[in-house]
């Protein structure tokens, strides 16, 4: 069946020159099965079905490579004083003697599915999931990843996934200092589950499921686990996503253990290359807060072909910013985008990214909305080695999203991308398609009871919030760890 999807604005792709997006007006995208078969003026091609979207911008589906797969935790952990913030980590005593999973396997599967639905509602069509491990008894299991794959298949979301694994966890000692609690057996067990999942995923005959290695954070991986990850990736060709260059504690821990900074560890273990994705990639040797005499990291990163997964909204909420988007781009570093935490709204993320780039550079042209939309589409496709994604072009996979531009609260319309990013949010996603299957229609995910889902998510969130106290090294109650914005009157 040929479907013609028509819209006032269509962000199409031209391979002329370097290859880039161009904006068409009053245009259609014709889809047959999973592919785009025609792009051009409205009504130019024969079709069996016409979907008229009206006053929207129809663009490539968004690619989120550090994709929220949680209820929410940023609303709890992004605003405390350093003293209170320590209470949100595991205490060493908890890690050693009292570790427990706050949610059982079925609840974890629900939470992941809830995250996937949120991604679809915000126009994401390809996701590499990330969930907080703080509520788990260690990290994720093979079974968790299989359950997530099932949810992705049901919903029609394309995922690059695997169980998160680690051999250490950031903890707080009795005296309030931070360190890492190590457990190599759990690290090996997690890695074995990840390897097993790669085999399982390879046997799934669908473009929706792609096995990927997702070790947690560089400072929580033993040298052994880093080497095993690198060897398995080389063996299988799997992509690896590893959080690194995201904080000063991380840098200090890695320097202490390896004698060299995180980027050098990535290089020495053979991980640094085109198959590596690095959220958040902020603390390079050139960053003003990093104590280093060198200024090589940006060049090394660019030459490696690794991709930075830039998560502007989450980073900003934790007090950090890429310094700077323009400098990374000019150096030739590959940049894709991620949401990382709630809300999984790349439109807001893009606006935050552009705004912070301006602040950092004191220039209004430091980064453009076009640059950021390119990172969210073509940048993601490049990181995944998927030249068929992130673009509306004949022969490309039919991953599309349409954002409404006719909400009176958006005000008047100018350039559709600037109007969307500056005056609207990802909540204006109205229609989406993944590999030709409709995943969002009239702003809703087909077959999902959002009211029931939200009710259950709230009850799980309440339990999750409670559980912070048992992990705090001072065992402070929730009221003390999470004071309200205003005291109760
Ligand atoms: Zn992250």
Image: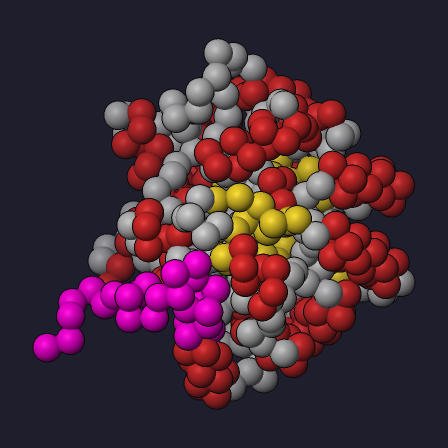
Q: Residue at x 50, y 26 (%)?
A: 284
Q: Residue at x 70, y 52 (%)?
A: 183
On the image, the x and y values in percent for residue 126 come to 62, 57
Q: Does residue 177 appear left or right of residue 151 in this picture?
A: left
- Residue 473 place in picture, x, y as percent: 43, 59
Residue at point 74%, 50% (across, down): 184
Q: Quadrant of residue 437?
A: bottom right
Q: Quadrant of residue 223?
A: top right
Q: Position of residue 357 (x, y in %)?
A: 35, 33
Q: Is residue 177 visible?
A: yes
Q: Residue furthest front?
A: 175
Queried whether the magenta region covers residue 393, the answer comes back as no
Quarter of the C terminus within the rendering: bottom left
Task: Check the image and tell me how it is coloured.
Answer: secondary structure
| Along the viewing direction, whichever of 84 and 93 lies nearer the viewer | 93
Q: Residue at x 41, y 78 (%)?
A: 462
Q: Is residue 462 above or below residue 361?
A: below
Which is more toward the observer, 96 or 361? 96
Q: Is residue 484 magenta?
A: yes
Q: Which residues are magenta?
A: 464-489
Left/right of residue 15 with respect to residue 359 in the rendered view:
right
Residue 208 visible in the displayed image: no
């Amino acid at each position: 069946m040929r479907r013609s999807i028509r819209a006032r604005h269509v962000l199409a792709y031209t391979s002329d020159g370097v290859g880039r997006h161009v904006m068409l007006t009053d245009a259609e995208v014709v889809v047959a099965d999973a592919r785009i078969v025609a792009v051009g003026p409205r009504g130019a091609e024969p079709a069996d079905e016409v979907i008229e979207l009206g006053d929207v911008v129809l663009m490539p589906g968004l690619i989120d490579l550090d994709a929220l797969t949680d209820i929410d935790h940023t609303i709890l952990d992004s605003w405390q004083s350093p003293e209170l913030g320590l209470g949100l980590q595991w205490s060493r005593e908890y890690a050693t003697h009292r570790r427990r999973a706050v949610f059982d396997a079925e609840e974890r599967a629900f939470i992941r599915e809830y995250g996937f639905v949120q991604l679809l509602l915000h126009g994401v069509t390809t996701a590499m999931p990330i969930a907080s491990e703080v509520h788990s008894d260690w990290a994720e299991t093979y079974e968790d990843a299989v359950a997530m794959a099932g949810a992705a298949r049901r919903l029609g979301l394309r995922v690059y996934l695997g169980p998160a694994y680690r051999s250490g966890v950031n903890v707080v000692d009795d005296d309030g200092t931070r360190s890492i609690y190590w457990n190599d057996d759990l690290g090996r067990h997690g890695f074995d589950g990840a390897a097993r999942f790669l085999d399982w995923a390879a046997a799934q005959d669908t473009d929706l499921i792609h096995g990927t290695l997702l070790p947690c954070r560089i400072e929580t991986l033993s040298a052994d686990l880093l080497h095993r990850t690198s060897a398995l990736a080389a063996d299988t060709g799997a992509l690896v996503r590893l959080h690194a260059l995201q904080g000063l504690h991380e840098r200090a821990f890695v320097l202490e253990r390896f004698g060299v900074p995180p980027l050098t560890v990535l290089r020495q273990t053979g991980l640094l290359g085109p198959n590596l994705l690095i959220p958040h990639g902020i603390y390079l040797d050139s960053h003003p807060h990093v104590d280093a005499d060198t200024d090589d990291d940006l060049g090394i990163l660019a030459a490696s072909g690794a991709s930075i997964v830039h998560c502007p909204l989450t980073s900003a909420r934790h007090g950090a910013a890429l310094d700077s988007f323009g400098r990374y781009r000019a150096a030739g570093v590959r940049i894709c985008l991620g949401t990382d935490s709630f809300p999984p709204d790349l439109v807001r993320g893009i606006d935050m990214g552009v705004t912070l780039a301006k602040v950092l550079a004191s220039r209004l042209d430091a980064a453009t909305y076009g640059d950021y939309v390119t990172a969210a589409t073509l940048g993601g496709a490049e990181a995944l080695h998927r030249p068929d994604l992130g673009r509306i072009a004949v022969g490309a996979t039919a991953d599309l999203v349409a954002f409404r531009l006719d909400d009176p609260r958006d005000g008047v319309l100018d350039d559709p991308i600037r109007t969307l990013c500056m005056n609207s949010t990802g909540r204006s996603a109205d229609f989406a398609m993944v590999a030709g299957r409709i995943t969002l229609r009239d702003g809703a995910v087909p077959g999902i009871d959002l009211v029931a889902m939200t009710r259950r998510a709230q009850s799980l969130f309440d339990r999750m919030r409670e559980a912070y106290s048992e992990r705090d090294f001072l065992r402070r109650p929730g009221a003390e760890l999470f004071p309200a914005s205003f005291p109760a009157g």
